[in-house]
Amino acid sequence: MRRICLTLVGIYLLFLHAFSQTSAPQTAAPQTTAPANDTAYHSRKLKIDEVNLVSSYYWQNGDHSAIEGGIGSEKVTDLANGLELKLAAYDFKQRKNHLTLGFGLDHHTAASQAWVSSTGASKTGGTRLYPSINWARENETKGTTIGFGAIYSSEYNYHSLGLDAEFSAKTHHKGEFTAKLSTYLDQVKEIRPSEFNTVDTITNTTGGTVTYTTASGKTVTLNSGTSYTEETGKAAIPGTPRDTYTASFSFSQVINTRLQGVVLLDLVTQNGYLGLPFHRVYFADGKDTIENLPSTRYKLPIGIRLNYFLGDNVVLRGYYRYYTDSWGIHSHTASLEVPVKITPFFSVTPFYRYYTQTAARYFAPYEKHTESDSYWTSNYAYAAFTSSFFGTGIRIAPPAGIFHSSLKTLEIRYGHYTQTTDLVSDVISMNLTWK
Amino acid sequence: MKQNTRTCQLFIAGLLTIVMIGACTPVKEYQKNRLNDSEMSLSNRKVEKNELNFQSYREGSAGANGGKTGGGCGCN
């Protein structure tokens, strides 16, 4: 009897519980979970899609420093770091919006930088900061994406503002076409080698205190018998503009179940101050001057990449690029990477890159230019040379994350680079991805 | 002569594009397991980003690889 009564009370309480819920209040706030009915969709809040950290340590050595006119140490170290935060959200039309926030921090040391001063007393290090923002909207129904981006870069002698706009569309044949317009609006600080700065010295030879105005317009007060020296190159260093405009096009295509490729084309035009004001050039008579390059440059690189899945565990990633520009440089680049999938989530990737270029028509080594030349540079980046870059990388990407954490991908890569100009460098890089 | 070389290079790039499209065989979604592998991605690896920058600083050419084409720093 007691059991029956308790059972009846329990059933009665269940009925009461079923009718105790009240309907939710009508508000304009979007819901983040299941829609109220089968056909209505609601916007999702902005959420973190992915976080990437890329760090590299680079070191090099050589003996053709452009600061010393094509001779001298090219010893450089560079620690480069980039953090990227990718956020995603759907809008009211169910288009996926991507917001990418980036922050870069590089610190370098360069032995030749000490010789911007003719006494070797200039500082040898520098830091570059470069924040960036990029927004893209993907329409999955139409297969199109539009995007806009901006980046700002700042270092002691160089400031840059970059802007870009991008459009991509999928084709009916499993291909994708992308067009991107970008510009860099830069300011180059005219820091000259010290021997080219004008020195202005004022000496007070009177019996009392006198106020003078220097050649740059600065006011100084000197006591009797004292002097003030001003290097006009340091007092007020002007900035000179350098602008770069690029139209980039790419077309990717799935060819068959194992092969896909992409063709890339850039049309680049640069104008403004295209050299660097602290690069020296020595003429054949021993007299030195500052690098002098044309104020316009047009570039045309064309590249193709083909990836082929060989067997069950090996991928062949091939790349070729031809480059030509209005300064007379023609180059060929060819590289091959062979990722070997040891397990589905662990791969080892040896790689090799070959590069060869002709010299720019304005390049000549130390003490080979003459004053009758129209332009002159001894920067060995513009010399004729061949280079090799080889190394290997590993990639770990288990689907459950590394040690079951939110760290989804770990990549480490090492490469050794040599040029026939005797420049040698090494770089080790790491990429971490959290999702 | 240089104009002819440039025209020839552009022609070859266009021809390669047409050959790529023409050589295509239809691929169904369930056949894309190899194509969707992360090692088959047509873009550069994230870990290569700084390598591409260092190469553009030390060499006279840049571009057509998803990296810098010029500007943005005191280099090419």
Image (cartoon, rainbow, N blue to C red):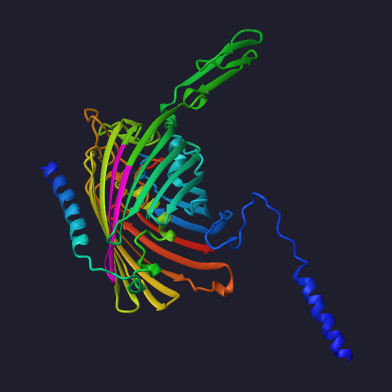
Q: Residue at x 52, y 24 (%)?
A: A235
Q: Is residue A367 left or right of residue A143?
A: left
Pick whichever, A286 or A104, lies toward us.
A104
Horizontal and vertical percent position of residue A328: 21, 41
Q: In which image quadrant can residue A306 be found?
A: bottom left
Task: Confirm whether residue A427 shows in the render.
Answer: no
Horizontal and vertical percent position of residue A413: 43, 65
Horizontal and vertical percent position of residue A203: 56, 14
Pick whichever, A143 or A407, lies toward us.
A143
Task: Confirm whether residue A3 shows in the render.
Answer: yes
Report the number of discs: 0
**Vertical position of residue B40 compared to residue A178: above or below:** below
Q: In which image quadrant can residue A324 be found?
A: top left
Q: Residue at x 66, y 8 (%)?
A: A208
Pick whichever, A157 or A260, lies toward us.
A260
Assess whether residue A261 is covered by the magenta stretch. yes
Q: Is residue A318 left or right of residue B23?
A: right
**Vertical position of residue A200 compared to residue A43: above or below:** above
Question: From this viewpoint, which residue is outermost toward the right?
Answer: A2
Question: From this viewpoint, which residue is outermost toward the bottom?
Answer: A1
Query: Which secondary structure type mostly characterizes the magenta part of the structure?
Result: strand
Q: Residue at x 50, y 57 (%)?
A: A55
Q: In which image quadrant can residue B43 be found?
A: bottom left
- The stretch of residues the image draws in magenta is A247-269
**Vertical position of residue A410 compared to residue A97: above or below:** below
Assess whether residue A399 is covered by the magenta stretch. no
Pick whichever, A11 or B17, lies toward us.
A11
Horizontal and vertical percent position of residue A238: 46, 26
**Image quarter (top left, top right, bottom left or bottom right) of the C terminus of chain B:** top left
**Image quarter (top left, top right, bottom left or bottom right) of the N terminus of chain B:** top left
